[in-house]
Amino acid sequence: MSEPITKLTAANLAALLCARICHDLVSPVGALGAALEVFDDDDNLDMRDDAMELIKLSAGQASAKLQFLRLAFGAGGSAPSVIASDELKKLSLGVYGDGKANINWELAHDGIDKTAARILLNLMMLAVMSVPRGGEITVTSDQTDDQTSIKIVCEGLKARLDPSVPATLAGAAPEVGFDGRNIQPFYTGMIARECGGKATAQIDGEIVTFLAQLPHNDTPDISR
């Protein structure tokens, strides 16, 4: 017998997702503020070149994260109903391309619908966290007339999968309660269920696998 699906009010879900977005942006925005303070202090003239480099780096990081999160958590603005594979690769590498893990992008088709794209980006967030010491992350997908499947395989030293991730993907509430971090896998599973599919995660040794199976149907995209 399957576990009951946890339901959150719209207000609680929105608040928790906002907390997650703020968590992801606080580092580059905080670095921007620290760098700008250097220009307000005449005693730091010799540090201004370094501060300018930090401003450029932090602004780029903040911009990349905003573009990524805009599609992963939001409507993606005027983004089309089908998102190009190259765009998803660009968004992912913009945020995680300089990290410890090497990302192998092996999508065999040119694009996927917006709902599947949002799930892919959310699974990418979980994938990067599963190999904190670096390794290989391989992203693949397959489309048939009936379904889109997304698979992300993560292999690396000390690869890990928080036990709350498979549970929250399946719709269970975490034992410690929801917060800005664990709301993200719950949200990922929720999107998958709303289109009649599911998202799962499992670990085998030092290999973590994320899988989403999403049937093609006429369910409207709630982000539009």
Image: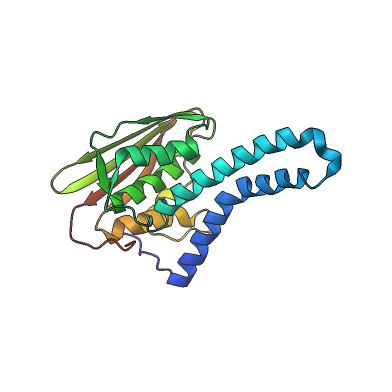
Question: On the picture, is 71 further left or further right than 112?
Answer: right
Closer to the camera in the image, 99 or 134? 99
- Residue in the picture at 49% in, 50% down: 66
Closer to the camera in the image, 185 or 82? 82
In percent of width and height, residue 212 lies at 30, 46
- Residue in the picture at 42% in, 56% down: 73
In percent of width and height, residue 80 lies at 29, 52
Question: On the picture, is 30 further left or further right than 19?
Answer: right
Quarter of the picture containing the N terminus is bottom left
> From what the image shows, is residue 77 above or below residue 37?
below
Closer to the camera in the image, 23 or 207? 23
> From what the image shows, is residue 94 above or below residue 20?
above
> Among all residues in the image, which is located at the extreme left?
145
In percent of width and height, residue 175 lies at 51, 59
- How many numbered discs, if any? 0
Residue 179, visible in the rendered structure:
no
Quarter of the picture containing the C terminus is bottom left
Question: On the picture, is 101 further left or further right than 45?
Answer: left
Residue 202, visible in the rendered structure:
yes
